[in-house]
C-alpha cells in the first residue's frame, strides 16, 4: 500500500479539540496550585513554584503542539525510528546517571540544564509513533507483530530496571491497543490473548515483593490502613466529603491540612473531588470525552494508516484498510 502523507492545513484545525485540551490543562494547573498552596509559608501565586512550573510546562507544551502540527507527516514517518532510538538512549542514561526515590532504589529522572526530565514519559510518545510506522503500511501479520514486540521489549525492560512497573504496564497496554486498533486478524489476537494469560502468573511471581504488595493494597487498602493503604483511604474520604459542589478551592480540609499525601500528583483527582465536588468531576470527564471524540474524528478523516494510528487510537474499518480507500478524503492536520 502506498501512503500519501499530506502536509499541514491550518484552516482545518479543530477548535473543539483545542478547547478541550486547554480546558484540561487549565484545570490541572488550578488543582495543582490548590494542592500545593499550603506548602509555602507565604502562599501566593508568585511564591508558588509548583504553579510557576506548571504554567511554564503548559506554554512549552503548546509550543511543542504547534511545532508537531506544522510538521509534515512524511518527516515524522521518516523520523519514527530515530525518535524511538533517542528514547532508548534516554532510558539507558537513567540507569547510569539518573536519580529518584531512595525508598526502593528507584531512579527515573535525569537532569538537563537544571531541569529534571523523565525519559520514560517521552518513550510513551515515541512508542506510538514507531508502532504507527510499523503498522501503518499494511494490516499486521506475523512479521510486523514480531517486529513490534521486539520494539516493545527494549523500553519495557529498561523501564522495569529503574524500576517503574506502572510505566512498563502502560507501554505494554499501548502496544496491545495499537495491535488491536491496527486491524490485526482475530486469530492473531486470540493467540496473543492466550499467551498473555499463560504469562500472567509467571510475570506475577517475577515481580519484586513491594510491587506485588502495592497491587494487593490497591485491591484491599483496609489490609494496611495506617501505612500502605492510608493514602487510598484518605483519598476516598476526600472525594466523598466533597459532595455535589465541593468545599471550594483552597478550602478542602483533607488537602489543605495535608492528611492526603502527594495530593499534587498521584492523588490530584482527590483534590478535585473534595474542592470541586461531583460537578467538578463531571466537568473533567466531559472535557476528556470531548477530547476523545474529536481525536476519533481526526482519525476518521485521516487519509492514510500512519496518520490515523499516530493521531487517534481507533479501529480501522475494512474500507480504510484497502489501498486507496482514503485517497478521496481530505487530509486534516490538528
Image (tube, rainbow, N blue to C red):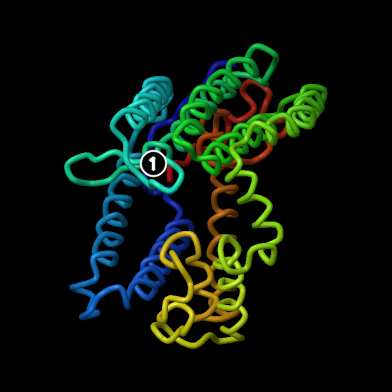
Q: Residue at x 39, y 41 (%)?
A: 9
Locate residue 233: give its quadrant. Answer: bottom right
Crowding around mark 1 (Cα neighbors within 10 Å: few <14, some 14 to 19, many 20+) is some
In the image, 166 versus 177, the foreground residue is: 166
Position of residue 119 relative to residue 136, above or below, is below
Q: Residue at x 43, y 48 (%)?
A: 103
**Is 201 displayed left or right of 76 in the figure?**
right
Q: Residue at x 61, y 23 (%)?
A: 324
In the image, 308 versus 114, the foreground residue is: 114
How many dots with numbers?
Answer: 1
**Is 209 displayed left or right of 126 in the figure?**
right
Q: Residue at x 72, y 29 (%)?
A: 202
Locate residue 53: give its quadrant. Answer: bottom left
Look at the image and tell me in which quarter the N terminus lies. top right
Position of residue 52 relative to residue 89, above or below, is below
Residue 323 at x, y percent in the picture: 64, 20
Locate residue 183: give its quadrant. Answer: top right
Local SS, label 1? loop
- Residue at numbered disc 1: 9
**Is 82 displayed left or right of 224 in the figure?**
left
Amino acid at each position: 500500500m502506498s501512503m500519501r502523507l499530506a502536509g499541514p492545513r491550518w484552516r482545518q484545525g479543530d477548535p473543539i479539540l483545542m478547547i478541550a485540551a486547554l480546558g484540561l490543562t487549565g484545570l490541572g494547573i488550578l488543582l495543582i496550585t490548590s494542592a500545593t498552596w499550603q506548602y509555602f509559608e507565604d502562599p501566593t501565586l508568585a511564591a508558588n513554584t509548583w504553579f510557576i512550573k506548571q504554567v511554564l510546562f503548559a506554554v512549552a507544551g503548546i509550543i511543542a503542539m504547534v511545532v508537531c502540527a506544522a510538521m509534515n507527516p512524511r518527516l515524522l514517518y521518516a523520523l519514527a525510528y530515530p525518535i524511538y532510538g533517542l528514547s532508548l538512549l534516554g532510558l539507558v542514561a537513567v540507569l547510569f546517571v539518573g536519580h529518584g526515590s531512595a525508598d526502593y532504589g528507584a531512579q527515573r529522572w535525569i537532569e538537563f540544564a537544571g531541569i529534571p526530565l523523565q525519559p520514560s514519559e517521552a518513550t510513551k510518545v515515541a512508542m506510538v509513533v514507531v508502532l504507527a510506522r510499523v503498522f501503518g503500511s499494511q494490516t499486521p501479520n506475523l512479521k510486523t507483530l514480531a517486529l513490534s514486540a521486539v520494539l516493545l521489549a527494549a523500553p519495557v525492560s529498561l523501564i522495569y530496571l529503574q524500576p517503574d512497573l506502572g510505566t512498563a504496564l502502560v507501554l505494554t497496554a499501548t502496544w496491545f491497543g495499537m495491535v488491536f486498533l491496527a486491524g490485526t486478524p482475530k486469530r492473531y489476537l486470540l493467540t496473543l490473548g492466550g499467551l498473555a494469560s499463560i504469562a500472567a502468573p509467571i510475570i506475577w511471581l517475577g515481580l519484586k515483593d513491594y510491587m506485588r504488595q502495592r497491587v494487593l493494597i490497591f485491591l484491599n487498602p483496609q489490609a494496611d490502613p495506617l501505612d500502605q493503604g492510608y493514602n487510598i483511604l484518605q483519598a476516598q474520604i476526600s472525594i466523598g466529603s466533597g459532595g455535589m459542589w465541593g468545599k471550594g478551592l483552597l478550602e478542602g480540609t483533607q488537602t489543605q491540612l495535608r492528611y492526603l499525601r502527594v495530593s499534587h500528583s498521584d492523588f490530584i483527582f482527590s483534590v478535585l473531588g473534595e474542592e470541586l465536588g461531583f460537578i467538578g468531576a463531571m466537568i473533567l470527564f466531559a472535557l476528556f470525552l470531548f477530547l476523545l471524540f474529536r481525536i476519533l474524528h481526526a482519525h476518521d478523516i485521516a487519509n492514510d494508516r500512519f496518520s490515523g494510528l499516530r493521531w487517534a487510537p481507533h479501529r480501522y474499518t475494512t474500507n480504510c484498510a484497502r489501498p486507496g480507500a482514503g485517497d478521496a478524503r481530505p487530509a486534516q492536520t490538528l
